[in-house]
Image (spheres, rainbow, N blue to C red):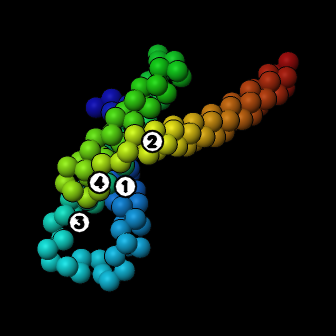
Amino acid sequence: MNEIKKTALWFALLGFVVGVAVGVMFYLPARPDGFLAHEENRHALLLYFLFSGLYGGLNMGSSALYSIENWSILRCTLTHLAICVGSTIVFFCGMILLGWMSVPSAPVCALAGAAFVFVYAMIWLGQYLAYRRQVKKMNAKLRAWKGQRK
Protein backbone atom coordinates (compact mmCIF):
# COMPACT_ATOMS: atom_id res chain seq x y z
CA MET A 1 0.00 0.00 0.00
CA ASN A 2 1.49 3.33 -0.95
CA GLU A 3 2.07 6.12 1.54
CA ILE A 4 -0.88 8.28 0.47
CA LYS A 5 -3.33 5.40 0.87
CA LYS A 6 -1.92 4.64 4.34
CA THR A 7 -2.27 8.29 5.30
CA ALA A 8 -5.83 8.39 3.99
CA LEU A 9 -6.72 5.24 5.93
CA TRP A 10 -5.27 6.54 9.20
CA PHE A 11 -6.93 9.93 8.74
CA ALA A 12 -10.22 8.20 7.91
CA LEU A 13 -10.03 6.05 11.06
CA LEU A 14 -9.24 9.07 13.19
CA GLY A 15 -11.99 11.03 11.44
CA PHE A 16 -14.46 8.22 12.14
CA VAL A 17 -13.69 8.42 15.86
CA VAL A 18 -13.90 12.22 15.83
CA GLY A 19 -17.16 12.06 13.86
CA VAL A 20 -18.73 9.73 16.41
CA ALA A 21 -17.47 11.94 19.25
CA VAL A 22 -19.01 15.02 17.63
CA GLY A 23 -22.22 13.06 17.07
CA VAL A 24 -22.29 12.21 20.78
CA MET A 25 -21.70 15.86 21.70
CA PHE A 26 -24.70 16.89 19.58
CA TYR A 27 -26.86 14.05 20.91
CA LEU A 28 -26.27 14.40 24.64
CA PRO A 29 -27.71 17.92 25.08
CA ALA A 30 -30.77 16.88 23.10
CA ARG A 31 -31.34 13.74 25.21
CA PRO A 32 -30.19 14.32 28.80
CA ASP A 33 -32.33 11.39 30.01
CA GLY A 34 -29.81 8.79 28.94
CA PHE A 35 -27.55 7.66 26.17
CA LEU A 36 -29.68 4.75 24.93
CA ALA A 37 -32.60 5.31 27.26
CA HIS A 38 -35.38 4.40 24.87
CA GLU A 39 -35.39 0.94 23.30
CA GLU A 40 -37.17 2.06 20.14
CA ASN A 41 -34.53 4.71 19.42
CA ARG A 42 -31.45 2.49 19.71
CA HIS A 43 -31.27 1.49 16.06
CA ALA A 44 -31.84 5.05 14.85
CA LEU A 45 -29.25 6.33 17.30
CA LEU A 46 -26.66 3.75 16.28
CA LEU A 47 -27.34 4.59 12.63
CA TYR A 48 -26.85 8.29 13.49
CA PHE A 49 -23.49 7.52 15.12
CA LEU A 50 -22.49 5.39 12.13
CA PHE A 51 -23.38 8.25 9.75
CA SER A 52 -21.48 10.71 11.94
CA GLY A 53 -18.43 8.46 11.91
CA LEU A 54 -18.58 7.93 8.15
CA TYR A 55 -18.98 11.66 7.60
CA GLY A 56 -15.95 12.42 9.76
CA GLY A 57 -13.92 9.60 8.23
CA LEU A 58 -14.65 10.64 4.66
CA ASN A 59 -13.86 14.30 5.24
CA MET A 60 -10.73 13.72 7.28
CA GLY A 61 -9.54 10.83 5.14
CA SER A 62 -9.85 12.94 2.01
CA SER A 63 -7.40 15.44 3.48
CA ALA A 64 -4.70 12.98 2.40
CA LEU A 65 -5.21 14.56 -1.04
CA TYR A 66 -2.83 17.27 0.14
CA SER A 67 -0.06 14.65 0.17
CA ILE A 68 -0.20 14.21 -3.60
CA GLU A 69 2.95 16.07 -4.58
CA ASN A 70 2.20 16.55 -8.28
CA TRP A 71 -1.14 18.26 -7.54
CA SER A 72 -1.31 22.02 -7.08
CA ILE A 73 -2.63 23.42 -3.81
CA LEU A 74 -5.64 24.74 -5.76
CA ARG A 75 -6.47 21.30 -7.17
CA CYS A 76 -6.12 19.66 -3.75
CA THR A 77 -8.25 22.32 -2.08
CA LEU A 78 -11.04 22.29 -4.66
CA THR A 79 -11.15 18.48 -4.72
CA HIS A 80 -11.23 18.29 -0.92
CA LEU A 81 -13.87 21.02 -0.74
CA ALA A 82 -16.01 19.18 -3.30
CA ILE A 83 -15.76 15.96 -1.27
CA CYS A 84 -16.66 17.80 1.96
CA VAL A 85 -19.60 19.65 0.41
CA GLY A 86 -20.82 16.49 -1.32
CA SER A 87 -20.63 14.42 1.85
CA THR A 88 -22.46 17.14 3.78
CA ILE A 89 -25.26 17.19 1.22
CA VAL A 90 -25.52 13.38 1.33
CA PHE A 91 -25.47 13.44 5.15
CA PHE A 92 -28.31 15.96 5.33
CA CYS A 93 -30.33 14.19 2.61
CA GLY A 94 -29.99 10.98 4.61
CA MET A 95 -31.21 12.75 7.74
CA ILE A 96 -34.20 14.15 5.81
CA LEU A 97 -35.04 10.75 4.23
CA LEU A 98 -34.88 9.05 7.63
CA GLY A 99 -37.20 11.68 9.08
CA TRP A 100 -34.62 13.06 11.51
CA MET A 101 -35.07 16.60 10.24
CA SER A 102 -37.47 18.48 8.02
CA VAL A 103 -36.58 19.88 4.62
CA PRO A 104 -35.04 23.31 5.21
CA SER A 105 -36.07 26.33 3.15
CA ALA A 106 -33.85 27.68 0.37
CA PRO A 107 -32.58 30.64 2.46
CA VAL A 108 -31.65 28.29 5.30
CA CYS A 109 -29.78 26.05 2.85
CA ALA A 110 -27.98 29.06 1.35
CA LEU A 111 -27.02 30.36 4.79
CA ALA A 112 -25.81 26.94 5.91
CA GLY A 113 -23.80 26.54 2.69
CA ALA A 114 -22.23 29.96 3.10
CA ALA A 115 -21.37 29.21 6.73
CA PHE A 116 -19.84 25.87 5.71
CA VAL A 117 -17.65 27.47 3.03
CA PHE A 118 -16.64 30.28 5.42
CA VAL A 119 -15.58 27.84 8.14
CA TYR A 120 -13.77 25.71 5.56
CA ALA A 121 -11.93 28.82 4.29
CA MET A 122 -10.93 29.85 7.82
CA ILE A 123 -9.57 26.39 8.63
CA TRP A 124 -7.74 26.29 5.29
CA LEU A 125 -6.25 29.75 5.86
CA GLY A 126 -5.09 28.80 9.35
CA GLN A 127 -3.41 25.65 8.05
CA TYR A 128 -1.84 27.54 5.13
CA LEU A 129 -0.38 30.23 7.39
CA ALA A 130 0.96 27.63 9.86
CA TYR A 131 2.69 25.66 7.09
CA ARG A 132 4.03 28.86 5.52
CA ARG A 133 5.59 29.78 8.89
CA GLN A 134 7.19 26.31 9.10
CA VAL A 135 8.63 26.67 5.60
CA LYS A 136 10.09 30.08 6.48
CA LYS A 137 11.76 28.62 9.58
CA MET A 138 13.20 25.73 7.55
CA ASN A 139 14.51 28.12 4.91
CA ALA A 140 16.12 30.30 7.58
CA LYS A 141 17.83 27.22 9.07
CA LEU A 142 19.03 26.19 5.61
CA ARG A 143 20.47 29.66 4.98
CA ALA A 144 22.20 29.59 8.36
CA TRP A 145 23.55 26.10 7.65
CA LYS A 146 24.83 27.20 4.23
CA GLY A 147 26.52 30.21 5.84
CA GLN A 148 28.35 27.97 8.33
CA ARG A 149 29.69 25.74 5.56
CA LYS A 150 31.46 28.60 3.80
Q: Which residue is mark 1?
A: 19
- Disc 3 from disc 1: Cα separation: 14 Å
- Disc 4 from disc 3: Cα separation: 17 Å
Residue 146: x and y in percent read: 79, 22
- The part of the image, by quadrant, that contains residue 105 is top left
Residue 99: x and y in percent read: 21, 56
Frontmost of labels 4 and 3 is 4
Identify the secondary structure beneath mark 1.
Answer: helix
Residue 57 appears left or right of 112:
left
Q: Are marks 3 and 1 in contact (CB under 8 Å)?
A: no
Three-letter residue code for mark 2 = Pro
Identify the secondary structure beneath mark 4.
Answer: loop
Three-letter residue code for mark 4 = Ser
Three-letter residue code for mark 1 = Gly
Identify the secondary structure beneath mark 3.
Answer: helix
Residue 80 appears left or right of 119:
left
Q: Are marks 4 and 3 in contact (CB under 8 Å)?
A: no
Checking the image for residue 102, the label placed there is 4
Checking the image for residue 107, the label placed there is 2
Residue 116 appears left or right of 93:
right
Is residue 72 among the parts visible in the rendering? Answer: yes
- The part of the image, by quadrant, that contains residue 123 is top right
Three-letter residue code for mark 3 = Leu
Residue 147: x and y in percent read: 85, 22
Identify the secondary structure beneath mark 2.
Answer: helix
At a point 72% along the width and 35% down the height, the residue shown is 133
